Image (cartoon, rainbow, N blue to C red):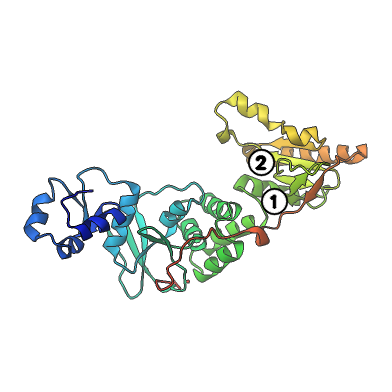
């Protein structure tokens, strides 16, 4: 940071990652002439009234701070932007930066910042250093509502629940709080998250298996332990009476086609424990659901006819009781859930 700044400004600049408002600079001891001289030479204007104390490209963190400074002291990051900061669904900070302000402040768009007002003000706004942001549940619901496709919206909500960033009850609260706008895709996403699935392909698999007239009830992502009490790989779907695991393998997690193909049928620790394992892919679930169902039903009937069950114990997973919100410092006197 610039050592020529007055001490108070220097400390504030460190806290705000080198981003200050014109007002902060002037009130901190700079003269208008000094500010004009340094803008365009050493510093750059990021947004109206917001200065980066460098002429380089701002980092994501600096852009987030700048957006909040532009929107005002009662603003907070929201929607896909807040979801990205919370690490939900692999989202990245991208334009526009989404910011909420309490009504009656006005909604507006400027450069790469989108400011919307809201009357939903009972939200526990979280703090991360100089950042204020929506709680994980509201961020996920708003991000899902803003997603470009229904599949992506479903994926955000499933990921938020699976990663335990947000409780299902909190996701349901914010879905209801939003009212009818975009509620269909949000309720579909909640239904998938409540199924216990950890991804959209898993949810599609569970829905497919539930249509079977052959299979008994199927568990999603149970905890499985062998006869020595050692925890085994968590199956995506589980049929307990014959100890049959269905694993969804996605090509995206493997660097080449051969490595991916080799994992589809092999989940070593489960097979070592003599669990019956059936491997499927997201593509086959979507493109050949009947073939997938026939294959799993055939494996189930064969395992039942054998009369042999692996010596393992499975415990069902309850998505409503195991979710937790990642603890963070809260802003008790800031905007707190209302109607956007």
> Which element is circle 1 on?
helix
Front residue of 333 and 154: 333
Disc 1 crowd, CA 10 A, few/some/many (<14, 14-19, 20+): some
x and y, in percent, of residue 44 in the image: 18, 49
* Residue 338 against residue 143 in the figure, above or below: below
Front residue of 165 and 35: 35
> Which element is circle 2 on?
helix
Image-based side of 143 in relation to 297, left or right:
left
Q: Tell me which numbered mark, 1 or 2, is placed earlier along the sequence.
A: 1
**Distance in Å between CA atoms under marks 1 and 2:** 10 Å
Q: Which mark is residue 207?
A: 1
x and y, in percent, of residue 65 in the image: 31, 56
Residue at the image position 80 percent from the left and 53 percent from the top: 217
Residue 179 in view, yes or no? no
Image-based side of 308 in relation to 179, left or right:
right
Quadrant of image for the C terminus: bottom left
Specify the quadrant of the image occupied by residue 36.
Answer: bottom left
x and y, in percent, of residue 106 in the image: 30, 70
Disc 2 crowd, CA 10 A, few/some/many (<14, 14-19, 20+): some
Specify the quadrant of the image occupied by residue 232.
Answer: top right
Front residue of 117 and 17: 17
Residue at the image position 55 percent from the left and 56 percent from the top: 165
Residue 40 in view, yes or no? yes
Q: Residue furthest front?
A: 7
Judging by the rendered image, the residue that carries numbered circle 2 is: 285
* Residue 139 against residue 105 in the figure, above or below: above
Q: Residue furthest left?
A: 33
């Amino acid at each position: 940071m610039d050592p020529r700044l007055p001490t108070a400004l220097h400390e504030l600049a460190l806290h705000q990652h080198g981003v200050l408002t014109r007002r902060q600079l002037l009130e901190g001891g700079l003269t208008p002439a000094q500010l004009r001289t340094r803008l365009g030479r050493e510093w750059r204007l990021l947004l109206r009234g917001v200065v980066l104390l460098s002429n380089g490209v701002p980092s994501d963190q600096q852009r987030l701070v700048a957006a909040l400074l532009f929107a005002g002291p009662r603003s907070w990051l929201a929607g896909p932007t807040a979801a990205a900061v919370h690490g939900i669904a692999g989202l990245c900070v991208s334009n526009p930066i989404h910011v909420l302000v309490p009504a009656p402040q006005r909604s507006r768009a400027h450069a790469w910042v989108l400011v919307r007002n809201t009357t939903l003000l009972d939200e526990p706004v979280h703090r991360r250093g100089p950042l204020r942001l929506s709680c994980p549940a509201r961020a996920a619901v708003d991000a899902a509502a803003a997603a470009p496709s229904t599949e992506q919206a479903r994926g955000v909500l499933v990921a938020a629940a699976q990663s335990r960033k947000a409780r299902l009850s909190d996701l349901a609260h914010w879905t209801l709080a939003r009212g009818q706008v975009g509620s269909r895709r949000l309720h579909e996403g909640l239904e998938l998250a409540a199924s216990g699935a950890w991804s959209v392909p898993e949810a599609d698999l569970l829905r497919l298996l539930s249509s079977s007239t052959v299979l008994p009830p199927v568990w999603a992502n149970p905890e499985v332990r062998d006869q020595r009490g050692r925890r085994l790989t968590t199956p995506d779907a589980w049929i307990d009476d014959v100890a049959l695991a269905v694993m969804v393998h996605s090509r995206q997690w493997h660097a080449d086609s051969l490595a991916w193909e080799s994992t589809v049928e092999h989940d070593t620790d489960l097979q070592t424990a003599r669990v019956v394992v059936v491997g499927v892919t997201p593509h086959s679930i979507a493109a050949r659901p009947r073939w997938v169902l026939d294959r799993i039903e055939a494996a189930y009937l064969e395992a039942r006819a054998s009369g042999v069950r692996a010596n393992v114990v499975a415990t069902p997973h309850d998505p409503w009781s195991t979710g937790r919100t990642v603890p963070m410092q809260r802003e008790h006197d800031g905007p707190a859930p209302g109607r956007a």
